[in-house]
Amino acid sequence: MLDKFFNPKSVAIVGATIKEGKVGRVIVENFKKRFKGKIYPVNPKYEEVLGLKCYPSVKDIPEPIDLVIIVVPAPVVPQVLRDAGEKGVKAAIIISGGFRETGTEEGKRLEEEVKKISMEYGIRIIGPNCLGIYDNWSGVDTFFLPDEKMMRPKKGYISFISQSGAFASALLDWMAYRNIGVSRAISYGNKIDVDDIDLIEYLGEDEKTKLIIMYLEGLKPGRGRLFIDKARKVVEKKPIVIYKAGKTARGSMAAASHTAALAGNYQLYKAAIKQAGLIEASSFDEIMDLSKTLLTQPLMKGKRVYIVTDAGGVGVMLTDALASEGFELPRTPEDLRGELKKILPPHCIVENPIDLTGDADDERYITVLEKLLPRNDVDAVIVVALPQIPGIRGKLFEYLVEAKRKYNKPMLIIIIGSKEAEKFKAYLEDKGIPVFESPERAARALKALYTYSIIRGVAQK
């Protein structure tokens, strides 16, 4: 049933306008740029909007409509929705605010009226008080922010669900700037109908979604058990990274005034998140760290991690960070120790973390990794390659891309620095190898991968 939202053949945009900077104009522009289906602007004030014939109401459109997008003042929304129902429309995105989130009796009344009309005509609703949908595959784009304000990311396989429109738009812009691909993004606002559970279920079956990100303020009352059950089924196929907002009493108050959300007791949510098998992120940075790792890396079979570094201090920091996350950093076995001593200069340290020291070069790294990666007693490798040393010229990073395909073993990279570091980071991440700027962030990301590997039954606790 939700497919009409993501793959409509025709859309009506109610509140379309020619006025610069207005929401109704930006949405028409978005659809003209990206959408391949039929577009019908609706506004009784105009006969034409941006070169498209404009209709006085949805009922005046001569063709069937799959999706109606409503961008009019809240008091007008019920009549627009009724017109859509009489037209036979079964999906509506209500961008307009001014409903329950206002905390007023009039806002609550309008929301209840909209809900009643939707049930009467069998119309599914996303919103109100939302940005709606950005779909990179079909071209549906109700995010009313012009391209110069919010960059659109390239096509990819991360989808995200957000109760906050501002968070969704910021995340899209951030990912576009960093060349991270996105499949679909949904901002659902007050969620009077379609909610987190419906969207998780839809994206769980979506072939173009390999990882789901969620920003959640609160669930609808009585939906907790169903949320756990549906999410658990989805994580059997693909990971879900969740950020729960409104953890504190004051944050819960902010959520209530933001989207009329009942943020609830965080400890209960935390237990539900764990029970459902979701991976919880604690910050914006962590959302992306966990997502890029879960999206690109194979599952772990165990928790034995080896470090290869050109910086002893960073190796020690990383050892502490990994140990704090519960990983094992095995002592280098005698057979491997012997092999490494044969190929490395005497001043290199063959104990894990394996320190190739500041005179390392690409070839030294490659030689050591060729000994480590094929081993069955190595579950993951983290490579610390600070590019300030003269011997790091780029061949190592080409090797890492090939080794990812050859060995299919979890491999994270730490690169710290400025222009040279950013150049190598961009190259690796474009090839599906996650790069981190701190040992602690890398350790937390690997912990998320290990946790999900346990959930999938690949690794043992």
Image: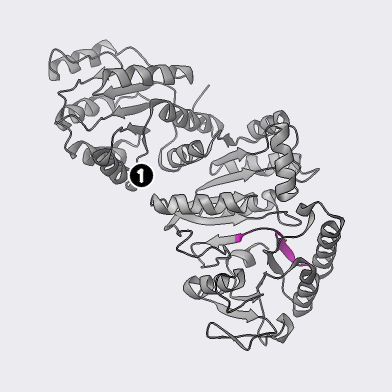
Q: Is residue 124 magenta?
A: yes
Q: Residues within 10 Å of mark 1 (few under 14, many from 20)?
A: some
Residue 4 in the image: x percent, y percent? 64, 67
Residue 179 image point, x, y percent: 38, 52
Q: Position of residue 227 (x, y in %)?
A: 70, 42
Image quadrant assignment for residue 8: bottom right
Residue at left offset 62%, top offset 59%: 131
Residue 207, visible in the rendered structure: no
Mark 1 residue type: Gly
Residue 70 picture quarter: bottom right
| Residue 394 belongs to magenta span | no
Residue at position x 49%, y 62% from top? Answer: 136
Residue in view at x 34 percent, y 40 percent: 433
Span colored in magenta: 122-132
- Colour mode? one colour
Is residue 402 left or right of 202 when viewed as pictured? Answer: left
Q: Nearer the viewer, residue 262 or 373?
A: 262
* Magenta segment main secondary structure: loop
Q: Is residue 84 above or below residue 369?
A: below
For residue 434, side relative to residue 387 (left or right): right
Q: Which residue is mark 1?
A: 432
At mark 1, the secondary structure is loop
